[in-house]
Image (cartoon, rainbow, N blue to C red):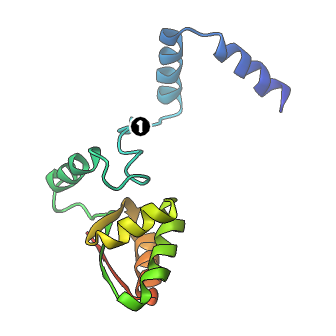
Amino acid sequence: MNPKVATIVDQISQLTLLETADLVSNLKSRLNIPDMPMGNFGAAISPAAPAAPAAAEEEEAAPAAQAKTLFALTLKSFDAAAKPKVIKEIKSMLGLSLVDSKKFVESAPKQMKEGVPKEESEKIIETMKGLGAVVTMD
C-alpha cells in the first residue's frame, strides 16, 4: 500500500464517529459529490426484500417526463423443457443456492432484479429468452 494512503487510513481510523461524519461532509462538499439515497442494497440479493416495494413507489412518484434509466426485471414464465437451464442461470445471476434457485424459478412470476441499467436489462432478457424463459423489464 502507498505510504501516503496508509498514513491517511491510520488517521481516519482514529477519528470518532462525529469526526468521521464531519470528514465525509467536507469531502462531499469539496469534491462536489451529491448526496445519494442509501437503500435497497439487499434487493439485488434477495428479490423479496421488504425495501423493494418502497423503491417502486418512489419511482412511480418521479416525474413522467424524466426518462427511466433503471429497471426491475421479472421472470414471468419459462418453457418446462428449459427449466434446468433457467434454474442454472438464475443461480449464477442472483448468487442463490441450487435449492433456492429452483424454488425461485418455480414461483414465477417473480421479480429477479431491481435497479438494473437498460443495457444490462436487455442483455439479461436476451440471455433468458435464449434459454426459454420470459423476462419483462418494468
Q: Going 47% across and 10% down the picture, which residue do you hit?
A: 18
Q: Amino acid at mark 1?
A: Pro
Q: Nearer the viewer, residue 79 or 135?
A: 79
Q: Going 46% across and 22% down the picture, which residue do you hit?
A: 25
Q: Residue furthest front?
A: 99
Question: Can you identify the residue that label 1 sits on?
Answer: 34
* Mark 1 crowdedness (10 Å alpha carbons): few <14, some 14-19, many ≥20: few
Q: Position of residue 48 (x, y in %)?
A: 30, 53
Q: How many marks?
A: 1
Q: Position of residue 43 (x, y in %)?
A: 37, 51
Position above or below: 59 against 10: below
Q: Quadrant of residue 79?
A: bottom left
Position above or below: 38 against 47: above
Q: Going 65% across and 17% down the picture, which residue do you hit?
A: 12
Q: Position of residue 66 (x, y in %)?
A: 23, 60
Does residue 76 show up?
yes
Position above or below: 16 against 10: above
Does residue 72 show up?
no
Quadrant (top left/top right/bottom left/bottom right) for the C terminus: bottom left
